[in-house]
Image (cartoon, rainbow, N blue to C red):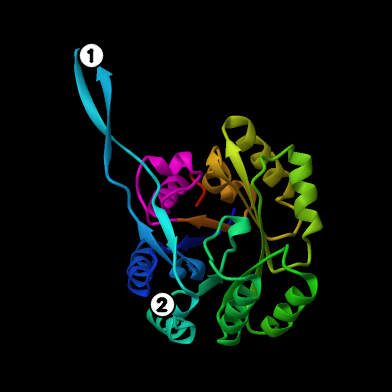
Amino acid sequence: MSRPTICVTLRGCSVDEMLSDAARATAVGADICEIRLDKLWVIEELPAPVEREEPKADRRRRRPVYIPPDYIPQAMDSVDLKETLAALQGGIDLPVVITCRPIRQGGYFPGTEEERIDVLRTAIKTGVSWVDLETDIDKQTRDELLTIAQGKTKVIASLHTDSEPASAVEVVEDIEELEGRGDIIKICYNTSGRNSGLKLFEAAWNMKDSGLKTAIMGLGIGGDWTRIHAPLLGQHLVYSTMETGAHLAGQGQINASDLLIAWDMLQYE
């Protein structure tokens, strides 16, 4: 079985933070990096630390409680897009995926859809290696972006849904409906445990010999199963992070270094 491409989604809400994360991703063996441009238009506000006491034998111990940060939207003119793209692409050794995720699909971009499309259009015209285009973009607009990308920028056709997977059969149907919309089909559901994770696992297993290049995953408990077993399932692309912490499993995410260790332990490489 072949090793899937590992894509590390860069953390941070500034160029410097993303470049620092990209250097770490390169060092651990990532193949490509995802730049979330939508996060450049927000400020990350970290919550005050909270500890939880848990009983253990006759004493008590404290554990930190993970609380996700808040993201405060900023004005559109707070980012010089062309300068930012030049700095990011010039400072990252790996190929990059440019993403500008809208709020409707779990992103943070604070502007209008027209402004977001203009961001994607500008990024594609720089000759970036990859661009993530949501499948629910207006068809005429999406076709225009595909035309600009043709021959120089590969496309990830992505769909993020708030729903849990209804069944493995329906997941496969969702993927097949997206055939031809990009070089790789990325589809992400909410997951809440074993049942959701097994549906995605079964769908990926059923798709492994289809010839389609896929990235099937969940956000939530069980959502990391298709990432951990991606080589077995014939997944083409796996998203990971340089973030660490026990909370990642509850989000369906996995640290890139831990992912490579898991593949080695499972003898997937």
Q: Name the residue beneath numbered marker 1.
A: 57
Q: Residue furthest left?
A: 59
Q: Determine crowd level at label 1: few under 14, some 14-19, many 20+ residues with C-alpha closer than 10 A.
A: few
Q: Residue furthest top?
A: 58
Position above or below: 268 against 3: above
Q: Determine crowd level at label 2: few under 14, some 14-19, many 20+ residues with C-alpha closer than 10 A.
A: some
The picture places residue 72, in percent across and down from the top left corner, at: 42, 60
Q: Name the residue beneath numbered marker 2.
A: 93
Looking at the image, which is closer to me, 42 or 222? 42
Residue located at (43% from left, 86% from top): 83
Disc 1 or disc 2, which is closer to the eye?
1
Q: Please say whether residue 252 is visible from this viewpoint.
A: yes
Q: Which residues are magenta?
A: 241-266
The picture places residue 3, in percent across and down from the top left corner, at: 54, 57
Asked if labels 2 and 1 touch by Cβ distance under 8 angstroms, the answer is no
Residue located at (57% from left, 49% from top): 230
Instruction: Indicate the quadrant where residue 223 lies.
Output: top right
The picture places residue 87, in percent across and down from the top left corner, at: 40, 83
